Amino acid sequence: MALGPFLATQHFPPLLQKSTLGKILNVSSDLASIADSDGGRIGYCMAKAALNQQTASLAADFTSQRIMALVAVHPGRVPTRMSRGTGLWTWRTRQGNWWRLSTS
């Protein structure tokens, strides 16, 4: 959902104004694209589309608050059930509680 990032973002401006490198990065998805919709996963797609709109709107609002960047990024698909096994990344190794991803 986009509500969590929105509520969290409301608390960041005072802290980010103290930094010369203030940034807010939202993780989006290509599934937020209305033009490229292939159906299914409607809740996820709607949440990511809302996150993209929120990012664009807040970026405009924060221009006067010395926040250097407010962006949404799509890091690439990982082959999971939700992506129907397709993706740019593959699971390679597990190190502790973290999975290392690779494009090869």
Image (tube, helix red, strand yellow):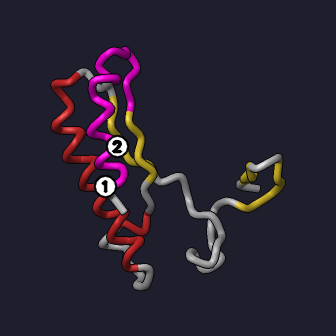
| Viewer-side label of 1, 2 | 2
Task: Please tell me whether residue 58 is drawn above or below residue 52 in the rendered image.
Answer: above
Q: Nearer the viewer, residue 62 or 29?
A: 62
Task: Please tell me whether residue 64 is drawn above or below residue 82 in the rendered image.
Answer: above
14 inside magenta stretch: yes
Residue positioned 73% across, 62% down in the render: 90
Task: Name the image quarter holding residue 38.
Answer: bottom left
Whether residue 39 sits left or right of residue 90 in the image: it is left
Residue positioned 31% across, 73% down in the render: 35
Q: Which mark is residue 52?
A: 1
**Where are the magenta residues, as a range?**
3-23
Identify the secondary structure beneath mark 2. Answer: helix
Looking at the rendered structure, the kind of residue marked 1 is Asn
Q: Nearer the viewer, residue 22 or 7?
A: 7
Badge 2, how many Cα within 10 Å: few under 14, some, many 20+? Answer: few
Return the x and y of residue 69 as percentages of the image width and height. 33, 31
Return the x and y of residue 64 as percentages of the image width and height. 16, 25
Identify the secondary structure beneath mark 1. Answer: helix
Task: Name the image quarter holding residue 91.
Answer: bottom right
Specify the quadrant that holds the N terminus. Answer: bottom left
Mark 2 = which residue? 8
Q: Disc 1 or 2, which lies upstream in sequence?
A: 2
Specify the quadrant that holds the C terminus. Answer: bottom right
Residue positioned 28% across, 24% down in the render: 14
Badge 1, how many Cα within 10 Å: few under 14, some, many 20+? Answer: many
Residue positioned 28% across, 61% down in the render: 50
Return the x and y of residue 71 as percentages of the image width and height. 36, 42
Whether residue 18 sits left or right of residue 81 in the image: it is left
Task: Please tell me whether residue 13 is drawn above or below residue 18 in the rendered image.
Answer: below
